[in-house]
Image (tube, rainbow, N blue to C red):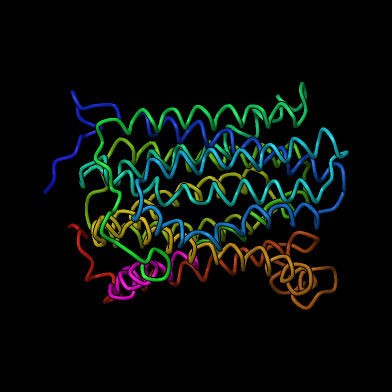
Amino acid sequence: METKPDAFNAGSNCRFFVFWLAGLIAAIGSGMTSFGIGVYVFERTDSAFVKSMISLAAFLPTIVVGPFAGALADRFDRRKLIVLSDGLSTLGVLLILYAVYFTNSNIFLIGCGVFLSALFSSMIEPAAKATVSDILNEKDYTKASGLLQLAESARFLISPVICAMVMAKGGLEAVLFIDLFTILSTIGAVICISRGLESKESTNEKGLGKQNLRQGFAAIKNNAGIRVLVIFMILLTFMVGSLQELSTPLVLSFTDAKALSMMITIAALGMVASSLYLGIREIKGNKIKIFSISAFGAGAAMVGFGIQEKVWLVTLFGFLFFATLPFMNSIADYFVRVNIPNTLQGRVFGIIGTISQIGYLFAYAFTGLLSDFIFRPLLSEGGLLASSIGAIIGVGTGRGIGLLIMCEGFALMILAIFLPASKGLSGLKGIGN
């Protein structure tokens, strides 16, 4: 096996640390912009629909561009691709600044800027994930995934707090300038780690588009265990998207925005705690069983999240839910790295990233409809389930939302029980004992 610099042992070089720090800075900057634009647009339009359309504009490029971004990551030098994509993403930020300064905050232009920035940013993730495989040894993959998820969680834990303080002083414009600075700093960091690192640019492959994508799809199709993981990750992202979409109306149905912000912050700490743990300790034992236990725990946390209108209870189970995600994500990433050849990992990560995001798409499209038109009426005063289930979990505006979250949680728990019996998963390399 090729020897790579070990970023976790004494005396090793600092490439991975620089790469991780760049990801942390980028996550904080982009998280500030995402949070700031959401607040800015909602305050000016007083429309949840307009805000959701802006969110959709930020989300769609991931679905459309992901597989092509993965193919590019395998065809060209991955570090150069990251630098180019980061640089082009500044065009979207500049367009948003133009809309704020010169068009009286034209919402359409802001949406175009969000889409443009997301379009180029979505090309970075497959190259960044595949770069980790270039830098580290196989035994460090799960620890690296934990640290990368820790950096990614900063957009939920740190960014909103910093963004709120910056906007209070300098408005959205100040937030956008900070984002531009973080982009430039991460470009410098990636250039730094590229020195002396072997380029993965391919000079022999031709037919970048369809041929490379077919190779990525074939790598997934020919591995039954990876196929099972992809299907599960679609379902998991649906659950995560549902909780993200429904938590705000659920919590605000019985308390205020201040309590909601505290709940979100503490829940994000669950992801931070698990990511820190995984960054320090390797996942040992049967990884399929650990994956299944984590999925069962996530489902149980969803049930607890929706069962009662108590801030401390919702906060506790929100923390537990997000604490399970890094374990599942790290193990899924590990299996892809171990079971897919390095030369295909960029496009495979791109394809898996795109396919798994479909779960979010369905969550954003349907959970609001299910909540408002099916579950909420069931547990309203005089509703069909008011005298039965309502006697246990309560009746009112948010109780139907709670029931929907609980139903999804029970479904995830049942699915987790059957995961270890999957023949496809049992055939994966690197399961461990």
Q: Give the residues in magenta.
A: 212-235
| Image side of residue 54 versus residue 75, left or right | right
Choose top left, top right, bottom left or bottom right for residue 53: bottom right
- Judged from this view, the residue extending furthest toward the top is 169
Q: Within the magenta stretch, is there residue 228?
A: yes
The location of residue 405, given as percent across then percent down, is 62, 63
Residue 285 x, y percent position in the rendering? 22, 53
Residue 309 location in percent, x, y?
Answer: 70, 52
Q: How many marks?
A: 0
- Judging depth in this view, the residue of 231 and 399 nearest the camera is 231
Q: Is residue 309 visible?
A: yes
Q: Residue 342 in the image: state x and y as whole percent.
A: 25, 55
Residue depicted at 19% across the width and 25% down the height: 10
Between residue 211 and residue 19, name the one nearer to us: 211
Residue at the image position 32 percent from the left and 73 percent from the top? 218
299 shown above or below 167:
below
Q: Is residue 60 left or right of residue 5?
A: right
In this rendering, would 126 be left or right of 184?
A: left
Quarter placement of the C terminus: bottom left
Q: In front: 32, or 205?
A: 205
Q: Left or right of 53: which side holds 195? A: left
Q: Is residue 192 above or below residue 333?
A: above
Helix, strand or loop: magenta stretch: helix
Q: Residue at x 49, y 59 (%)?
A: 66
Residue 421 seen from this side = no
**Most distant residue in the left direction:** 1
Given residues 274 and 307, the one toward you in this image is: 274
Q: Is residue 325 magenta?
A: no
